[in-house]
Image (cartoon, coloured by chain):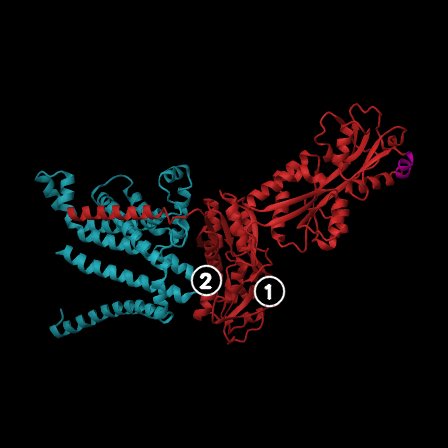
Amino acid sequence: MRSIALGSVLLAALLSWWVLRADVGPATGTGYTLTVHCAAGIKGPVTRAAKEYEQQFGNRVELTFGGSGALLSALTVRNHGDIYIAGDDSYVSDAKQRGLVAEILALASMRPVIAVRSGNPKNITSYRDLLRLDVRTGLGNPEAAAVGKIAKRVATDLGFWDQLRDKVTVMKPTVNDLGNDLQIGTIDAAVIWDATVRQYENLEIIEDPQLSRQARNVTLGVLRCTTQPRPALHFARYLAAHDRGLLVFSAEGFTPIDGDEWADVPQLELMSGAMLRPAIDSTVTAFEQREGVRVNRVYNGCGILVSQMKTGSIPDAYFSCDQTFLDQVQDRFQDGVTVTANDVVMLLRKGNPKNIAKLRDLLRPGVRVGLGHPEKSALGALTTGLLSRTGHLDNLKASGNVVVESATGDLLVNQITAGSLDVVLVYRSNTAHVGERCEVAPIQEATSQARQPFAIAKDSAHPHLMRRLLDTLRGADSRRRFEELGFHWRDGERPK
Amino acid sequence: MTTAPHRARADTAFLAALFVFLGLYVALIVAMLVADASFTSPADLWEAIRSDEIQSAAVLSLVTATLSAILSVWFAVPIGYVMTRFSFRGRALLDAVLDIPIVLPPMVIGLSLLILFSTPIGRAIESVVPITYQKPSIVLAQFAVACAFAVRTMIVTFQQIDVRHEHVALTVGCSRGQAFRHVVLPQVRRGMLSAFLLAWARALGEFGPILVFSGAMRMRTEVLPTTVFLELSVGRIDAAVAVSLLMVAAALIVLWIGRSFGLGRIGQ
């Protein structure tokens, strides 16, 4: 008996040593080790792409698999790791709402289709055929599987859900359960993803337009809890690149999205109205550091920027001072997204020695006025419109009081601060740092507000990356910076 | 009373009925294995055996199941002894509590462990020994379930041995500990081996709690049942079946050797 007890202690000690020792894992060299929680249904392409990535960059990718929902539940209880990849976008959206995910990248799209055995022995041609008595039908559980939810919604819209629910042979929680049942032969047809069908050699796809319209994306989320966002996003960009990871998805039967071009450190160009510089510069720098990319910023008056773009210098994105300037080059950009608005105000010398209160006071003899250049800047165009609407434009020009027309509001602020002007019409955000050297007076006769849209170039090689930059600029930290400078938050408003 | 020929016929019919049940159940098991085999090929099996991932999962499965089974027996022997030899208030309730891991769905065990190790106490433990999503979590998840089966086996074993031997030992001057060591333990060796093998088999097949508590990380926390799940998840039934058959073979060999040699020797 003593020898058994002793033997069990020694064996347990040896096995415990092995279990604890082995957890140190293989050496990772100089590279990073990433933990990726991946939906089991997309194990094939993600495993292959990860292996290629490891070989190319020397980083390690540790993949852990499970159902999309089960992984999300586990992450909710214990948030750890770097990346979460779900079988369809609803899970990643859910994770985003729960505050688990920061960036989201789409990888491939999947359409719901009817899967049957090769040769279509039951001659199924439409979704409605699944109601036939001679067809053993399988569906995903509407509560557990996204494809089951879609199958239910489409059948409800077509008016036969109750019949189908009563007639269905089996409901299963995952699409692969149904694929396996089809392959084994216990059912004749099932509604599953097209990409799932392509994983099986002896199954084929029957398209039904009502189902096909309900496509979903395989989606990746970078976890908020990651302590290494730059390597995590490096791998995420690799997976989502049309000439890298998405090639693998395509080879494995998925329909990849139109992803960005791969670059180890992407070089991007952002053209932005000069007035936006203090609001966005630090946000863009933080974005560069998190993503591991370079964003070359070109700040200038929007008229000058638009001229440059018209001569062929198209950036990856344009953050315009006003929608009117984006309109001039709209054919080269996707639709803009309005982020902020900015008032035009009067900035006066300290103590307002010329006693200026209204626009008509600018006409008084001896008042030195500075305006934005009407062609080189959005500020100038807006100011000209404002003066025209209030009937002062021609008189002001005739008065000879306009001493200077500058390409940017900041130049005007510099000049009034130096004492060479009595009043300038600038954006409220231009006045944020003048302190007590000048006074700000709102324009009482009319309001004039510029709206700042962000637009991504149609020809950009990195539209998704630029979309993430836009998302960052629309984030809470960025909003605070904008509002501190006097911008109004207009995120998501339709351009006027 | 029946005559001798009558009795012989009745016995034959009785024995035949017994063997029909045995035969039917064994036939069901064998039929399942044959059906499995029809869904794979020697090439699939060979590919499975050669795969680094599957070799790693196999070693991890065998090591963790063995460790879990040893730990289960260490706990099951004292627990079984206490539950059969002592009367105390709440014993019936405690008896029911010991069955909870058997009754609970396996996923719930995994989720409960995951939540437990997310509490301040769990995190304090993990600051010393990382457990969640690491190899020790596999042992803990297997142990949580397998130990309940070992405990049940040991309770039945202790119930079956005669208490009088112990009493005799106590009356000739043995302490309780000495009586337990020299009189009780030698009598429950067969039960301990049964508990070990049952716990081992249970731990080897454990899947639900491991998936939740340990994840399914290739070459790290992937055990053979996880491999089967992963292969099924991507529609590779042939590979899933190949791994399943490997598990059957491994389990069969260990249980067969354990029962025929271990029980035979210990029983003598």
Whether labels 1 and 2 belong to a single chain: the reply is no
The chain drawn cyan is chain what?
A: B
Asked if residue A257 is positioned above or below residue A127 in the image, the reply reads above
Q: Which residue is mark 2?
A: B234
Q: Which residue is mark 1?
A: A212
Q: Can you tell which mark lies on residue B239?
A: none
Residue B105 appears anywhere in the view: no
Whether residue A396 appears in magenta in the rendering, the answer is: yes
| Mark 2 belongs to chain | B
The residue shown at (60%, 62%) is: A154
Where residue A414 sits: x, y (%)? 75, 31
Q: Choose between A451 and A251: the one closer to the eye.
A: A251
Asked if residue B227 is positioned above or below residue A73 in the image, the reply reads below
Left or right for A249, reference B169: right
Marks 2 and 1: in contact by CB < 8 Å?
no
Considering the numbered disc 1 on the image, is that residue within a helix, a strand or a loop? helix
The residue range painted magenta reads A392-399
Whether residue A449 appears in magenta in the rendering, the answer is: no
Residue A236 appears anywhere in the view: yes
Secondary structure mostly seen in the magenta stretch? helix
For chain A, what colour was chosen? Answer: red
Left or right for B110, reference B199: right
Classed neighbour count for the residue bearing mark 2: other residues with Cα under 10 Å, few (<14), some (14–19), many (≥20): many
Q: Amino acid at mark 1?
A: Ser
Where residue A433 sits: x, y (%)? 70, 30
Left or right for A280, reference A19: right
Q: Amino acid at mark 2?
A: Val
